[in-house]
Image (cartoon, rainbow, N blue to C red):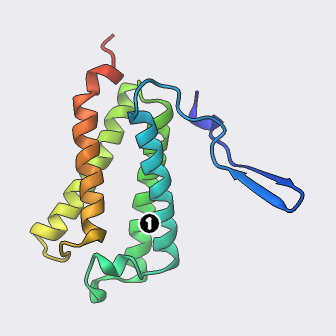
């Protein structure tokens, strides 16, 4: 099942409009592909939020540090990560895709950790803890399952 088969379908029946985001879920074994898809969809919503408002971003970083430009730049990075992770959900057995996806979590972990511990521009709160937990969980999960999903030739 390829990422290209992941399509948005809107069906109108009577007064009811049904939105189906994915025609097929990832078919690879295990829960990791579904996790990648879930995190990807979550990241898309986070990207939209960063394009539309600064409200939630200001819960992570100091008010003065959060600008429209910074939020939109963060939105583009998050959207890029979402695309890589969605592609991985449907192509989890491809080494290059798996490796790139793993690095998106490493970069996210590095960013949030450095903002907290080195630059001191973030404080411990749910807005910061959530991406740290997701990136850490994903890194540990992907590293521990590497041989299962990426078979040696």
Is 21 above or below relative to 55?
A: above
Identified at 27% across, 27% down, the residue is 145
Q: How many marks?
A: 1
Q: Residue furthest left?
A: 118
Identified at 90% across, 58% down, the residue is 14
Quarter placement of the C terminus: top left
Give percent across and percent down for residue 131.
Answer: 30, 59
Residue carrying label 1? 75
Secondary structure at badge 1 equals: helix
Indicate the quadrant where residue 139 lies: top left
Q: Residue furthest front?
A: 15
Indicate the quadrant where residue 59 lies: bottom left
Give percent across and percent down for residue 4.
Answer: 62, 36
Give percent across and percent down for residue 81.
Answer: 41, 51
Quarter placement of the N terminus: top right
Q: Residues within 10 Å of mark 1 (few under 14, many from 20)?
A: many
Is 60 above or below relative to 37?
A: below
Give percent across and percent down for residue 38.
Answer: 46, 47
């Amino acid at each position: 099942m390829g990422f290209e088969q992941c399509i948005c379908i809107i069906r109108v029946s009577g007064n009811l409009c049904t939105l189906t985001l994915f025609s097929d879920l990832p078919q690879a074994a295990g829960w990791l592909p579904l996790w990648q898809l879930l995190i990807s969809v979550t990241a898309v919503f986070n990207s939209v939020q960063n394009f539309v408002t600064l409200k939630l971003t200001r819960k992570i970083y100091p008010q003065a540090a959060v600008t429209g430009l910074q939020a939109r730049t963060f939105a583009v990075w998050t959207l890029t990560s979402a695309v890589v992770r969605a592609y991985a959900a449907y192509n989890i057995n491809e080494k290059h895709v798996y490796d790139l996806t793993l690095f998106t979590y490493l970069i996210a972990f590095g960013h949030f950790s450095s903002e907290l511990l080195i630059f001191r521009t973030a404080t411990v709160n749910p807005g910061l803890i959530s991406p740290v937990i997701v990136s850490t969980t994903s890194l540990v999960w992907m590293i521990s399952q590497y041989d299962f999903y990426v078979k040696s030739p």
